[in-house]
Amino acid sequence: MNRTFNNLKNKDSSNPNLFGIALLVILFSSSSYGLLPDFTELVEKAAPAVVKINTISVQKNSDEGSFQRQMPDIFRELLDPRRRPSRPARTMGSGFVISSDGFILTNHHVVADADEIQVLFADRSEYTAEIIGSDRRSDLALLKIDATGLPSLKFSNEENVKVGSWVIAIGSPFGLDYSVTAGIVSALGRSLPTEQGENYVPFIQTDVAINRGNSGGPLFNLEGEVVGINSQIYSPTGGSVGLSFSIPSNIAINVVEQLKKAGKVSRGFLGVSITDVTKNLAEALGLPGPMGAAVSQVTRGSAADKGGIVDGDIIVNIDGNPILRSEDLPHIVGLITPGTSVDVEVYREGKKKTLRVEVGSLDANDDIRLAGNNSFDRLGLVVEEIGADQARENRIRSGLIVVNVDPNSPAEIAGLKVNDIIVQIGYQRIEDIRQYDALVRQLRGQKPIALRFYRGGNAYFTTLEIN
């Protein structure tokens, strides 16, 4: 570098601007090179605790349909899928040891429906694992193998993670064992709702190259601590394009503790339907600015209802945690132990109000309920009786308003949406929920079912089919 500096000085002394630019380039390159991290020691220490996970699932065959039961035996045997040889489904992923006595953490989607789980270490040792517990909402699963004295990894304090921090991942993308990739944290608190509309994980976004097979593997900081569990990528092609998402360590710690104790996870739950507060909405409601989560509906009998939260409230703080955007609310509430009483700050009619709310519980297998105590019915709907004002606006005598639609259900496929008002099924007009429930229970799946509903004051017909 000194030789280059002297040559530039002698050659370009007549042009001070060019000389200054060249000097800055040399100094910047030299200092940048010296600041680049060296991952070799970290990888050597951490890699032995990272595992490859292979699963085998045997396809479950359904019962014969009525059509097959009516066929002669010779044809039934030919068409019966249970009599055909089936290949077991195989999946692969990654994981890591969290304690020396054989507990291993991975993704829920890696081991979901698995009949056999094989865990492979870098030293080529293999174990069969059992599932201690698995949580769909956080996409985490806790496994156990019969081993002791294993190398293990330590979780980091999530507060140490900042945008721009260096992070590395170790996993088995496409089955290529113990591959190492590096990058930086590009965003924090990313919300990626599931297909069920649930949103309980504030993901860490990175540009670390993650591909199929990396799922369940650890994301490290430069101290070798686990800051996240690699879970998803965003890609139009299926390959890495520089957007990968990891479950934060504080979420993982909470889930692991509950899975060890009970084999399932219970979360705090308020029972509200929420939406974002835009600049215009904030101005209309007299708020200082866009903030909080606007409560569009409170579930009857829920923790929010019992605690005094009403439709139209703007929740801006819960248990001392500010709610900046609507997606912050489920992230924070989900980590509160059910049964805990917390202060909830809301804006109501332009004034701030503090409520004392005992947080409810959302157990592992519960559906999120937005109306009363009803879960999705056979059509994939949650409905409520309409009020007198809605009946007058639509010029109808009675009907049921749709407050939730289950994704991929018969109702969703038929095009029904939230706030549609159902007034007729088949030839029967809908009078109340009791009559509706009786009609839905009697429906058969042999032919399409006619359904009439109102949307935006206009009446429509559609058909739906029940499998």
Image (cartoon, grey):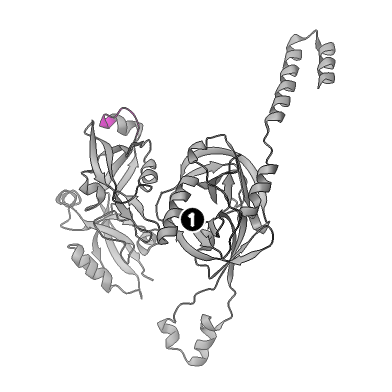
Is 242 positioned to the left or the right of 8 in the image? left
Q: Residue 410: percent from the left, percent from the top?
A: 37, 64
Q: Main secondary structure of the magenta part?
A: loop
Can residue 461 be seen by looking at this rendering?
no
Q: Nearer the viewer, residue 74 or 39?
A: 39
Q: Nearer the viewer, residue 353 or 297?
A: 353
Q: Give, as a single range, the part of the protein colored magenta.
A: 284-291
Is 33 positioned to the left or the right of 192 in the image? right
Q: Residue 235: percent from the left, percent from the top?
A: 57, 48
227 falls in the magenta region: no
Q: Nearer the viewer, residue 90 or 420?
A: 90
Instruction: Kindly indicate the quadrant of the structure image that contains residue 34.
Output: top right
List the single residue furthest toward the top: 14
- Secondary structure of the residue carrying tag 1 is strand
Instruction: Kindly indicate the quadrant of the structure image that contains residue 122.
Output: bottom right
Compared to residue 167, the image places residue 108 above or below, namely: below
Q: Which residue is mark 1?
A: 140
**Which amino acid type corresponds to the residue marked 1 in the rendered image?**
Leu
Residue in view at x 23 percent, y 34 percent: 353
